[in-house]
Image: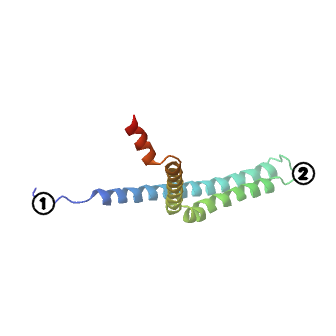
Amino acid sequence: MFSKPKNTSEIDLEQHELLEDAQLRIKQKKRLYSHFVIFLVGSVFLILINKILKYGADYNWFIWAITLWAFLFVIHVINVFVTQKFMGKDWERKQREKLVLKQKKKIATLQKEIETDFPISQINSKESNI
């Protein structure tokens, strides 16, 4: 009752952010694994259609379909495991900071231009003359 108030808001906020990031990563990996299972089942299905049901039996078109699908799956794997390391939350934060710094510099140069074109002393002297 008379104890010092604990500063748990920052800790809770950090834990909440970490939890959200972890949930996002879990969702990404879950989608990737689902994609892999669907890829395997779909590949078998394409082979069955071509070989067993004799749809387009004179040409093995399933090889091209599976190759294209495998390429898309590899892109998905790269996105989940490689790109997220290089372009994750830290990368986004750094990019945001760079853009904010660039905007601040632009605002500072505009303010300098305005001050040189319209000095405050001239504005104050015009106001006192009125």
- Closer to us: 123 or 8: 123
Q: Position of residue 97 (x, y in %)?
A: 49, 59
Image quadrant containing the C terminus = top left
Q: Residues within 10 Å of mark 2 (few under 14, many from 20)?
A: few
Residue occupying the far top of the picture = 130
Residue 115 disc label: none
Residue under the point 72% across and 55% down: 69
Type of amino acid under label 2:
Asp
- Closer to us: 7 or 99: 99
Q: Position of residue 22 (x, y in %)?
A: 45, 59
- Where, by quadrant of the figure, is residue 60 drawn? bottom right
Residue behind mark 1? 3
Residue behind mark 2? 58
- Closer to us: 30 or 113: 113
Q: Position of residue 13 (x, y in %)?
A: 35, 56
Residue under the point 36% across and 59% down: 14
Secondary-structure class at tag 1: loop
Q: Residues within 10 Å of mark 1 (few under 14, many from 20)?
A: few
Type of amino acid under label 1:
Ser
